[in-house]
Amino acid sequence: MMDVESVMCECCGLTEDCTQHYISKVKANFAGKWLCGLCSEVVSDEVSRDRELMTVEEALNAHLSFCGKFKANPAELVADGMKQMLRRRSGELLPAKTKMFGRAKF
């Protein structure tokens, strides 16, 4: 049986349960830091855009700086945006313009 432990993303603070093998693999790819799936994709994408201009460490530092500018966890912001979108689609939450007059105009 594989041991699972909780680990926190060093960029956004999201906590995930992962095996030690997976944690080690992620840390090996990102200068010894553990990143959640969302942050690791962002950093990897930045590096793949131009390998000559940006190293993994530079992309990681840029993303750490970006995440530090938000009071809320970026993963939570994405989840909240998805929740609002789904509510609008289901009719639970109408856009601000239609709420102002109390009825929707289609």
Image (cartoon, rainbow, N blue to C red):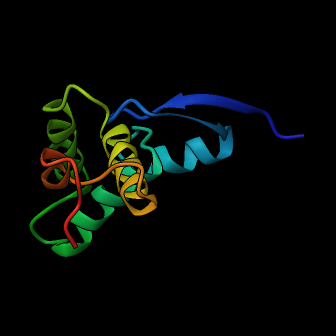
Q: Name the side, left or right, on which 5 lies relative to 68.
A: right
Quadrant of the frame with the C terminus: bottom left
Q: Is residue 49 above or below residue 9?
A: below
Whether residue 64 is visible here, answered yes or no, is yes
The residue sitting at the left extreme is 53
Identify the residue at image location x=24%, y=47%: 60
Q: Is residue 100 above or below residue 70?
A: below
Identify the residue at image location x=21%, y=47%: 102
Frontmost residue, 106 versus 5: 106
Residue 4 position within the rendered picture, expressed as x and y whole percent measured from the top left: 73, 34
Q: Name the side, left or right, on which 98 lies relative to 29.
A: left
Identify the residue at image location x=67%, y=45%: 21
Q: Name the side, left or right, on which 6 lies relative to 59.
A: right
The residue sitting at the right extreme is 1
Residue 3 position within the rendered picture, expressed as x and y whole percent measured from the top left: 79, 33
Where is residue 91, by image quadrant?
Answer: bottom left
Frontmost residue, 87 versus 39: 87
Where is residue 35, by image quadrant?
Answer: top left
Q: Name the side, left or right, on which 10 lies relative to 25.
A: left
Frontmost residue, 60 versus 103: 103
Residue 74 position within the rendered picture, expressed as x and y whole percent measured from the top left: 30, 40
The number of discs equals 0
Frontmost residue, 94 versus 17: 94
Q: Is residue 105 above or below residue 27?
A: below
Whether residue 39 is visible here, answered yes or no, is no
Quadrant of the frame with the N terminus: top right
